[in-house]
Image: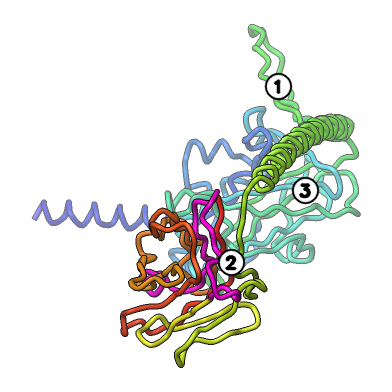
Amino acid sequence: MKKIILFLTVLLVLLFVGKIESHSFMKCVDWDFGSNSCAAYPRNYRFYEQQGDGFLFQRGKFTKPYPTELGQSCGPAQRRSSLITNLYSSKHPMGNFQPGQKICPQWPARNHANALRAGTVSFYLSPKMTPETATDPGQEVFFQHLIHSSPFGNCTKYFENTNNATCTACFDLPNDISSGLYILQFFWEFNPKEYYLTCADIMISSGSGYHYHEPSAPQRQTPPLREEFIPQRPTREELQREERQRDQEELAQRRKRQNEEYLEMQREKEREQMQRDIERKTAADEARKHKSTIFQHIMRDGQLERDFTSASWGPYSKKDVQYYETRPILGNVLFFKCASGSNCLSSKGKRTLNINILGYKEIVANTQVNLLTKGEKIPLSIALEQYIDSSFINDGDSFNTIRIPLERFFRNEFYAITISGYDDSNSDIIRVEAISLSN
């Protein structure tokens, strides 16, 4: 029986804690992202550090033991003392703002940041107050001056800690608000008619920064206390000076980059000029080399030289404007002979037979060439396959130059050249644009 009672007690405690942690409240009136710290706190925030979530204030139909009406605007932990400044300290200062200044209140997510019914967070501002005022205005007075409203979410690193993730709303205070003491109210309607409220006193002045002073206490003989440093917000002039300094640094960096880009551009121009000089020199050397090259042309640009005629035959051998073509199978031959009827081709001073040919690699490989001598009974055929190297462009649309050593033909003078094939499986044609002998 004792074990059952203990279990039920633990269960009730867990349910109570879970319920408390499902509610939220304003924990910071203005978060300073520059110093990464809270610059102004709600009223009597030290109570939260001592009592935890007992600081929050709930109203509406879900309060226990019975529903409550929305009348009281600030909770029991935030009731006014004889002097409102007694509810603040140097550790938890009151906010001191200017009209139109941007502030960033924060509150814990409490497992509701991504809930579809998380509701709306609103911020209301009271009429002007005095430090000695004994009571806060009723909720109906706050409802008359809404200054900001937004969804409950906008929480950072929510999935790392769904309970204590921090939610933020940044907004501007009214521009037309006059100097004096006011109450800023955090108002969250989670469910319809379920409300959570937090109050914070703020001072509106024409100055800047936070100027909180500890309330005066009865004089007594006590050792002097070490003054605690209170971070001050930068003035408008300091912000402008920092902005000018950043602009100057960015300008200096931009000029440095532009100078580096200009120098790199100059170096690139020098490299391009050096490359052009090398190319011109190479071209000049190549021109000198070609100038000393000895050529005897049989065909150029698809046209036979005047010393040669075509005696080609076969249904797939024909002349086009820029080339001769044939299908290299039995019965089809490109035949180009000396017009004089005698040997007019000489290998003297020459080493190579050059054929500029277009076709797929496997078709060209099955093609053969003959250099005929007048009166020769048995011509010697040379297959092109062994002279196709890695530079061959096998796309069927590019001309490739096949070079055959003239010494393979064992003759010095020739009468004609033939280009043909022997494999009937050759299904495509070849085209010949140029034929020459050279050294």
Q: Is residue 81 visible?
A: no
Mark 2 vs mark 3, CA separation in Å:
24 Å
Q: Position of residue 436 (x, y in %)?
A: 57, 62
- Point 68% across, 15% down: residue: 227
Q: Residue furthest bottom?
A: 315
Mark 1 vs mark 2, CA separation in Å:
40 Å
Position of residue 356 relative to residue 261, above or below, is below
Q: Position of residue 367 (x, y in %)?
A: 39, 73
Q: Which residues are magenta?
A: 337-365
Mark in the foreground, 3 or 1 = 3
Residue 350 painted magenta: yes
Q: Which residue is mark 3?
A: 102
Mark in the foreground, 1 or 2 = 2
N-terminal of the pair, mark 1 or mark 2, is 2
What is the secondary structure assignment of the residue under circle 3?
strand
Q: Amino acid at mark 1?
A: Ala
Q: Are marks 2 and 3 in contact (CB under 8 Å)?
A: no
Q: Amino acid at mark 2?
A: Glu
Residue 132 as seen in the image, left or right of residue 19: right
Q: Which residue is mark 1?
A: 217
What quarter of the picture does the N terminus occupy?
Answer: bottom left
- Point 53% across, 67% down: residue: 343
Q: Which residue is mark 2?
A: 189
- Point 63% across, 62% down: residue: 121
N-terminal of the pair, mark 2 or mark 3, is 3
N-terminal of the pair, mark 3 or mark 1, is 3
- Point 54% across, 71% down: residue: 342
Numbered label attached to residue 152: none
Give 148 or 55, whichever is nearer the viewer. Answer: 148
Give 101 or 391, whichever is nearer the viewer. Answer: 391
